[in-house]
Each structure stands twice: as C-alpha cells, then as structure tokens.
Image (cartoon, rainbow, N blue to C red):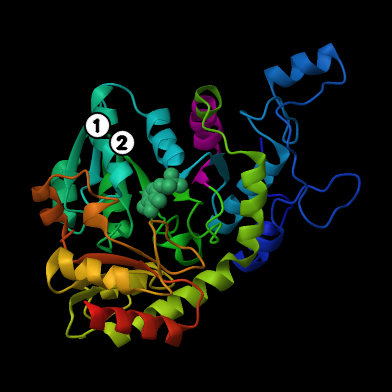
Amino acid sequence: MHGTDRPGDEKRAPRTLAVHAGARRSQYGEVAEAIHLTQGFVYPSAEAAEARFVKAGRDEFIYARYGNPTVAAFEDRMAAIEGTEDAFATASGMAAVTGALMAMLCAGDHVVSSRALFGSCLYVLEEVLARYGVEVSFVDGTDPGQWRAAIRPGTRAVFLETVSNPTLEVIDLAAVAGIAHEAGALVVVDNVFATPVFSRAVALGADVVVYSATKHVDGQGRCLGGVILGRRDFIRGTVEPFMKHTGGAMSPFNAWVLLGGLTTMELRVRAQAASAQHLAEALEGHPKLSRVLFPGLKSHPQHALSSEQMGGPGTVMALEVAGGKPAAFRFLNALRIVLLSNNLGDARSIATHPATTTHQRLPEAQKARLGISEGLVRLSVGLEDTEDLLADLTAALDAA
Ligand SMILES: *Cc1c(COP(=O)(O)O)cnc(C)c1O
C-alpha cells in the first residue's frame, strides 16, 4: 500500500531521508507533518467503499487499525532509512517482535534463537511461542557452530538481537544469515542496540528488521512505538493481515512524535556514540570496575566484528561494579546527572540494574550464563556534556 514516497528517494543519504521521506502534504502544503488523529475515513460513495475494501490504493485508508496517513509517513520514512521495501508500524517494540514472529509462524514450526535477549523478547520466544506449538532452540549467538548445529531443514526462522541487551554481545549477522538461508529460514533481527543509524542489517542478510522506536527513534523518552521492516510481500502479505486484525497498531499521535524524532536521530545517535566511546575508554581499568563492556573498546571480545558490521559502536555500555549488588546500588544511588530508569537511547543518560529490574524474572543460573551479574549496570549514554557525565560517573564510583 505504501512505499518510498518519491522516486529517487532510495538514492539519497539516510540523513536526508530521515528529514523528508514519506511526507504526505495536504492541500494546505503544511511544512511539518499533519497529525491525522482520526480512527476512520469517509468514502465518497458506497461503490468507493466497496472498492477500497477489495483493494486499497497507496493513499487510501479504511480504519486506523489498518493504516493512517501519519502512521504511513512514519512507515515510509523508516523503510527509506533502513533500505527495505516496506514497513509496518506497531504500538511498541514488543508488538513488532511478537507481530513479526506470530504473523509468519504456525504450530509445528521450528525457530532458532540466540539466548541473550531482552527480557520480554525471551518471554515471547520461550513462553508464548511454545504455548502455540512452535519449537524454539536456544543457542549461544556468538558461536556460529551452535547456529549451524541447531538449524535444520524445516527451520522457519532465526531470531537474534544483533547486539544483545544488556551484555553487548555482538552476533556475526552475515555468518548466521548464510547458515539460515541455506536451510531456507528467514532471518529476523531485533536491531535496537545497533540503531537505524549504524545498521547494515539488510546488506548483511537480514530478511526482517525490527526496532523499538521507543529508544533511539524518539530519543526523548516520550512515547512507545515499534516497526517491522522487510520485503513488500512479507510486510503487506504476511504482517499487515495479522497486525490489522489483532490490533497492535501505532497511534497517529505517536507516529507524529516519532517522525519528529527521526529528523534529529542521526545527529543524536552519532553524538551519543562518540560520548559513549570517550566514557568507556576513560572508565576502563577504573579500580571500582571489574569490567567495561562496550563494542567500541578493543578489549570487547567481538570488537573487530562490531566495527565491520556496524557504522559505530552504539550508545549503550555495561559497567560491572566490583563488590556485587551492594556496591552497584551505592554507585546507582550516588549518580546526580545520570537518571535511574530503564529506557535507553534517550537524550538523558540512564543507568539500569538489569539483575533486579529488566532481567529480574530470569532464574539465577540463566542470569549467570548470560553474564548478568549482581554488579552489572547498563548505561545508556545521552546528550549531556561528556565531561559532566564522566565527573558524575567517577564521583558515584568513589561512593561505591
Ligand atoms: C526496549 C526493547 C524492546 C521492546 O521495546 P518496547 O518499545 O519497550 O516494547 C525490544 N527489544 C530490545 C532489544 C529492546 O531494547
């Protein structure tokens, strides 16, 4: 139904597309995107209504659960930036993950997934899919041998976070895609930590790319959103029917907020990543930290892979405070600029203690296997002055 707005858009740089792609101007020629806060659309005639239900044109809408002009602008802009044929916007990142998987899978299907996942992704892969008769095999995502051993003829899909939350493991997407495609499996990636700015997911073999737009796309902590990106037949033929009937649609208001977010995304993400790089280098080796995990550090186990597969190191790092939970809590409680919360990709720097919050649900053994120790703190670096952040972090480490 939708797609790149103007012929030639696909040749422009992502930063240009992030400002202009997908725009739909009304007869008033407004500069900023209009918010179409309407649930439905009026048909000029009964015949037109009938025709639209049979096959709606690119800019013909029926009901906001199916599509809406402001949401369509967001979808087209995201597809243009990521370099996919099409996109479907969803109410949240988790609606996108669940929608992408549930839309294509049937009872009896087999999926292979990396084990290191965001808590809610793990719930969907481990609990929800199993309940509907989908078998999921979990592997150590950083070991291509384990992917090869687990993928079999008849594996429908593989699922991975290209950079895992919260331990920043980087998965060799090209290698996994190669193995998956040999078996005819679709490669579905949750690309939040890579961000749309540093993503090369499609070039590396991803068939379906999912983002939580709540993170770097908004980047200002204002609303939830998600998006599923891929080939047009998959988005319109498989995802859209499932999403439009099950109700995970994005609000037009949120689409409008997120369109604004996209115009500054590249500047924000590059500045945040540069600041994160500086902080990670400055903090590495600090006596109160037993580990600093950041793909941009040479000490990161997949540093070379990460530089090859992403245009930058990302904006999130993990700091392991020596002394376990008591020391980690003293550090968190002493922060004065960095906020204690659980979003990431925000303009405000945010620290999270995964073991007691986002990953609390996991059994101890699984936390240990994933490296989510009691001292581990996830730090999402924002847009504050880097030296102010460093002073805040080192003062809090003194208190730890
Ligand atoms: C936040 C996040 C999600 C979920 O996104 P919501 O917008 O909160 O639903 C999924 N995957 C990853 C990796 C995330 O960081």
What label does residue 285 carry, if any?
A: none
Q: Residue at x 18, y 39 (%)?
A: 137
Side (left or right) of 113 relative to 345: left
Q: Residue at x 74, y 32 (%)?
A: 38
Side (left or right) of 225 relative to 34: left
Numbered label tally: 2
Q: Quadrant of residue 273?
A: bottom left
- The range drawn in magenta is 224-242
* Image coordinates for residue 5, horizontal then vertical, percent: 72, 49
Asked whether 374 or 142 is in front, the reply is: 374
Which residue type does callout 1 highlight?
Glu
Disc 2 packing (10 Å; few <14; some 14–19; many ≥20): some
Ligand 1 is within 8 Å of the C-beta of the residue at disc 1: no
**Helix, strand or loop for disc 1:** helix
* Image coordinates for residue 110, horizontal then vertical, percent: 24, 32
Asked if residue 206 shows in the view, the reply is: no
**Helix, strand or loop for disc 2:** helix
Q: Residue at x 91, y 44 (%)?
A: 27
Above or below 285: residue 376: above
Q: Quadrant of residue 301?
A: bottom left
Task: Please say whether residue 96 is one of the residues in the magenta stretch.
Answer: no
Asked whether 343 or 87 is in front, the reply is: 343
Which residue type does callout 2 highlight?
Val
Task: Please say whether residue 231 is one of the residues in the magenta stretch.
Answer: yes
The residue lying furthest to the left in this view is: 365
* Image coordinates for residue 362, horizontal then vertical, percent: 18, 45
What label does residue 124 carry, if any?
A: 2
Compute the Cα span from label 2 to label 1: 6 Å
Q: Residue at x 43, y 29 (%)?
A: 103
The answer to whether marks 2 and 1 mark residues whose Cβ atoms lie closer than 8 Å is yes
Q: Which residue carries the number 1 mark?
A: 127
